[in-house]
Structure formats: structure tokens, C-alpha cells
């Protein structure tokens, strides 16, 4: 069953991570192959919540871009090095391709053989050397096994065209010789006594029993074919193992974890049509052709706690979004097909999750109830944020009963665990919970941290401002706002990059300065973003 990835926004907070895990539980009960993932490093608060309830951290998801392994290419499309040249050519013609990857016995990639390579070999190669398997020779000559001494046959092919006396007087046979001969018994006798590698009896001619016995004693292989000598010589060289056609230069390959769009750009420059697909260990997985209809198996994803493209996984436009569960305003993510959308004007995505459990008749386990409680308390600042609704309060009461936690005591522990910033750099602080937004004219980022120890942060004012300037240049946005929320006083201290002062003065109707305190400002979603969207145009 195809996997569905569930994830929140970048720079994940407690609500986004825990709601993803809660929805994973629901989907698995419903029979889906769902997995919660994280788009970034978990903050200390989130880690505390998960550890408190012995819940494993979700694995990191780098992106949802289409990779080669997601493409419907020619999978398991390759031939073993011992395959004959003729069978290789027939395989190419049958599958209407121009080439095929060649692998060893462990499926390690060795090279690419094309129809052009085979035809060039047939017309230009005057060598009579044979490197083949007994079985391939037997098959191509439509032959009969008389004596099998070896599975691998290596030697030089020659047809007996002299009369017997001339041949015996002028030709010295060795163990490297492969003879194609009719019913010339004296030559056959000399050959088995000389211990040649292989004798091919053409025209289904008779071979004496005594010669067969000598051949067995001297490890001489014998095959009988219905073809005449001329045709047998032509065909036997087609039984050469295809590895004999491999050139020393490695062809251009592509790895299954490469991004498909980057591969297309590379392929346009190279101009080739066939590209062997390898894994990281150079095991061949098949072949991708530019001329084929390379349809992609898009990654199926469910978004929680966001619907903004800039906040989601890289390559989200290349994924199939099947569902969104969010408590924010609608973002700018678009989809090419219908999807399930669940949005509620509540303080936390986990509040919505509580209703999804009930509506689907699924009991909430104690550990899931615990992390859901943590998610709601985090996003509503323990039910003190203006985003808090009566629905959130009712859900918290229910989750208290299931988890066995007192929400006020648990919130104190949770916020304390998440507010120890002494060992974090200014860059770390700002990136703990930062989100990208796109206004009507400007793009911007808003970061927020919540702590009862705001003075420790305020004292780092100058370095914070320097870091914001650097981050603005790197992110190529119009401005960045950083709110340090004091959970004890129910207000926030504001830091910002230059150029947005006029907007901020209109927002707060007073003169502003770095590190100024804004009373009753604790919610980014309700008390910051709507104001920025209103005034950023002016």
C-alpha cells in the first residue's frame, strides 16, 4: 500500500508535530499506510512533550520532490553479463529499445549495450574468439549435448575446410581450439586426443562412441547441431557473452534518489536517450528513457497546521495533497485534484484532531491524548491566548481525563522545558519558530518564542538585531519580525529589521523602537499576521 506522509510546517512547533502523530494514529486505525514526519529540528518544548509520554520523534522529511525512483521507468530492466549477444539483440528488438544495461551476478552495473554496438561488432569484428557458456552455445546452435566438461567455453573458433590429411599435417591443435567439423572422423579423433576445448559436429553427423569416450576422459566438450558448417560458424559467434561488447568507458547513469527535474536538465545537455538507473551501491534498478512516457508516482501527503506553500515541504507543488487539517487562515497552496479539508476557528490543530477521533469512532489512547494536550496548551499559551475558544477549553478538559494530567501543572513543566535558551545562539533562537508569509506586495518572516525568562533574551538585543539583518539578506525577504513573548505578563517584546518601521507604527499606533514591549500581544496568528497583512501594502 502506498505511503501517505503527514507533516506540519517548517520549523515545527509542538502543535504541528503532535497533531501529525495523532492523525497518523487515526489513519493507521483506518487501514492507511500513514507516517508522521517532521520538516525540521524539534524544539525543546516538543521533545519534552514526546518524552513525557514515551512517544517516538517523527523522522525528518527533507522534501517531497519527484525523484527518479518515483518515475515509472523500465524497472528490473537489465541482462546478466553471461547473456549471449544474440539473446541481447532479440531482447532489445522485442522491447523496442535501443539498448539495455548489463549487470554481474549481484546485479551490480557493468555497462550499457546498444543495438548499434552489436551491429558494429558483427560487421567490423573479424575476431574468431569465443567467450560463452555451454548453454548459450547449445541454445543458439539448436544443438544436442553430447559431452559437457565445462560450463564456460573460452577459445578460438575455426571451421575444418581442409581435407583430413592436409589438416592433420598442417594444423597443431591446442586446448584453446574450438572446432566446427562434419563427419571427418580422423580429425575428430585427433581433436579429442589433443584435448581441444569444444567440438561442434555440424549437420547432425554421426560421432563414434570411442571418440565420445576419449572426449570425456580428456574433458573435451562436444555439441551436435543440425546446421551446416557455414551456418554453425556464423551462429556460434553470436553466443559470445554480451560482456565482451562492454567498452571500458562507463556510460552516463542516473541514481534513483536524484531529482527528476535535475535529471531532465542534465539529459537535455547530454543528448542520450537511455540512462541506467542505479541505487547508492551501484546496483542496477533498471533503465529510464527520455522518449518514454515517464509518468510519476507523486508522493501522497496530508498537511496539518498549515496551508501556506512557503511553510510546507520543499517540492510541495510536485506532491499529491490528499487532505489538509488546519486552524489558520487559508494559505496559497493549490491542488490539481479534490481533497478533504478540515478547518476550524480554534486555538490548535489538536482540537480539530479530537473531533476527528470522535467522528470516526476511534478511542484516543492515553499517550496520544497526552501529546494532543501538549499541542493545545502550547498553541493557546495554556488557554490564555486570545485565540483560545470555548471548544479548546472543553477539549482540554476531556484530554485531561484521558491522559491523567493536570493541564496547569503540565503546562508549567512544558514551558519551563522549552524556555531554557542559555546555550542557544541568536540564530537558534530566531529559528525556533519562524514562518514565511507572502503578502499582497511583500514577503516576510515572523518568528516567536515563548518564555517566562524574557530578560535573558532582552540582554542579547544587539546580537539579535545583527542576526535578523543577516537572516533577512539570506532569505531574500522584505522584513523579519521577532516576538519574544512573556508568558507571565501576557505581552511580547518586538525586534525587527529596518524598512518596516512605518508599517509597525501604524500597526501599534505609536512610535516604535527595538525591543519595545507590546502589551496583550501573545498570538502571532491573531494579533500579528492580520495587522501585517493590512498595513504591509502602505
Image (cartoon, grey):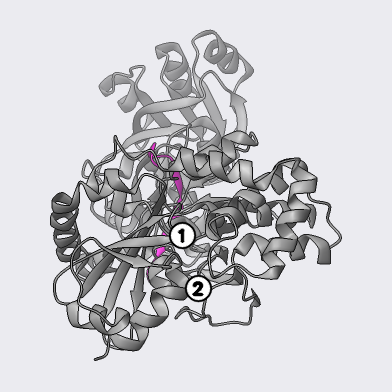
Residue 193: image x %, image y %?
Answer: 44, 11
Residue at (29%, 40%) from the top-left corner? 424
Relative horizontal placement of residue 122, taking residue 288 as reference (left or right): left
Relative horizontal placement of residue 210, taking residue 416 as reference (left or right): right
Q: Which residues are magenta?
A: 280-291
Relative horizontal placement of residue 133, taking residue 145 as reference (left or right): left
Report, in whole angstroms, how far the alpha carbon at label 1 lies from the one at label 2. 48 Å
For the residue pair 325 and 131, the one nearer the viewer reads as 325
Which element type, helix, strand or loop, lies under badge 2?
Answer: loop
Q: Quadrant of the N terminus?
A: bottom right
Residue 191: image x %, image y %?
Answer: 43, 19
Q: Which residue is mark 1?
A: 92
Instruction: Give above or below for 152 relative to 212.
Output: below
Residue at (19%, 65%) from the top-left corner? 472
Q: Residues within 10 Å of mark 1 (few under 14, many from 20)?
A: some
For the residue pair 245 and 270, the one nearer the viewer reads as 270
N-terminal-most mark, 1 or 2: 1
Q: Which residue is mark 2?
A: 307
Residue 65 seen anywhere in this rendered image of the structure: yes
Residue that protrudes farthest toward the bottom in the picture: 538
- 282 is within the stretch colored magenta: yes
Quadrant of residue 275 within the rendered picture: bottom left
Residue that protrudes farthest toward the top in the picture: 217
For the residue pair 111 and 478, the one nearer the viewer reads as 478
Q: Quadrant of the C terminus?
A: bottom left
Residue mark closest to the camera, 1 vs 2: 2
Amino acid at each position: 500500500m502506498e505511503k501517505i506522509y503527514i507533516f506540519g510546517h517548517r520549523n515545527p512547533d509542538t502543535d504541528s508535530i503532535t497533531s501529525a502523530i495523532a492523525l497518523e494514529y487515526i489513519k493507521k486505525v483506518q487501514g492507511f499506510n500513514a507516517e508522521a514526519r517532521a520538516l525540521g529540528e524539534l524544539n525543546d518544548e516538543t521533545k519534552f512533550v514526546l518524552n513525557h509520554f514515551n512517544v517516538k520523534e517523527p523522522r525528518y522529511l527533507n522534501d517531497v520532490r519527484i525523484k527518479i525512483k518515483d518515475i515509472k521507468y523500465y524497472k528490473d530492466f537489465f541482462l546478466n553479463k553471461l547473456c549471449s549477444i544474440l539473446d541481447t539483440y532479440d531482447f532489445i528488438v522485442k522491447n523496442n529499445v535501443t539498448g539495455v544495461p548489463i549487470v554481474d551476478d549481484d546485479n551490480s552495473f557493468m555497462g550499457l549495450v546498444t543495438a548499434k554496438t552489436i551491429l558494429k561488432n558483427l560487421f567490423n569484428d573479424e575476431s574468431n574468439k569465443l567467450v560463452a557458456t555451454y548453454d548459450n552455445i547449445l541454445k543458439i546452435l539448436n544443438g544436442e549435448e553430447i559431452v559437457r566438461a565445462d560450463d564456460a567455453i573460452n577459445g578460438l573458433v575455426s571451421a575444418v575446410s581442409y581435407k583430413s590429411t592436409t589438416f592433420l599435417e598442417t594444423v597443431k591443435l591446442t586446448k584453446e581450439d574450438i572446432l566446427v567439423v562434419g563427419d571427418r572422423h580422423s580429425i575428430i579423433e585427433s581433436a579429442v586426443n589433443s584435448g581441444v576445448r569444444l567440438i561442434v559436429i555440424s549437420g547432425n553427423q554421426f560421432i563414434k562412441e570411442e571418440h565420445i569416450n576419449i572426449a570425456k576422459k580428456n574433458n573435451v566438450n562436444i555439441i551436435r547441431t543440425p546446421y551446416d558448417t557455414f551456418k554453425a560458424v556464423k551462429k556460434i559467434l553470436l553466443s559470445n557473452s554480451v560482456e565482451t561488447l562492454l567498452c571500458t568507458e562507463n556510460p552516463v547513469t542516473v541514481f534513483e534518489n536524484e531529482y527528476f527535474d535535475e535529471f531532465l536538465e542534465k539529459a537535455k545537455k547530454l543528448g542520450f536517450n537511455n540512462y541506467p538507473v542505479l541505487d547508492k551501491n551501484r546496483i542496477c534498478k533498471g533503465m529510464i528513457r527520455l522518449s518514454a512516457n515517464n509518468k510519476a508516482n507523486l508522493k501522497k501527503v496530508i498537511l496539518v497546521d498549515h496551508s501556506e506553500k512557503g511553510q510546507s515541504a520543499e517540492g510541495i507543488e510536485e506532491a499529491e495533497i490528499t487532505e489538509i487539517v488546519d486552524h489558520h487562515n487559508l494559505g496559497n497552496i493549490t491542488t490539481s485534484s479534490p481533497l478533504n479539508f478540515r478547518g476550524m476557528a480554534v486555538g490548535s490543530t489538536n482540537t480539530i484532531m479530537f473531533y476527528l477521533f470522535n467522528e470516526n469512532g476511534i478511542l484516543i489512547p492515553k499517550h496520544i491524548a497526552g501529546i494532543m494536550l501538549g499541542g493545545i496548551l502550547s498553541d493557546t499559551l495554556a488557554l490564555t491566548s486570545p485565540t483560545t475558544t470555548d471548544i479548546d477549553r472543553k477539549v482540554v478538559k476531556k484530554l485531561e481525563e484521558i491522559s491523567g494530567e493536570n493541564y496547569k501543572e503540565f503546562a508549567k513543566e512544558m514551558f519551563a522545558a522549552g524556555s531554557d535558551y542559555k546555550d542557544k545562539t541568536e540564530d537558534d533562537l530566531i529559528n525556533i519558530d519562524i514562518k514565511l508569509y507572502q503578502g499582497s506586495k511583500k514577503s516576510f518572516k515572523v518568528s516567536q518564542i515563548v518564555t517566562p525568562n524574557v530578560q535573558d533574551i532582552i540582554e542579547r538585543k544587539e546580537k539579535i538585531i545583527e542576526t535578523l539583518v543577516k537572516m533577512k539578506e539570506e532569505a531574500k525577504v522584505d522584513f523579519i519580525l521577532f516576538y519574544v513573548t512573556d508568558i507571565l505578563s501576557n505581552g511580547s517584546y518586538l525586534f525587527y529589521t529596518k524598512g518596516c518601521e512605518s508599517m509597525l507604527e501604524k500597526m501599534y499606533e505609536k512610535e516604535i523602537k527595538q525591543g519595545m514591549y507590546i502589551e496583550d500581544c501573545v498570538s502571532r496568528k491573531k494579533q500579528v499576521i492580520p495587522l501585517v497583512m493590512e498595513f504591509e501594502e502602505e
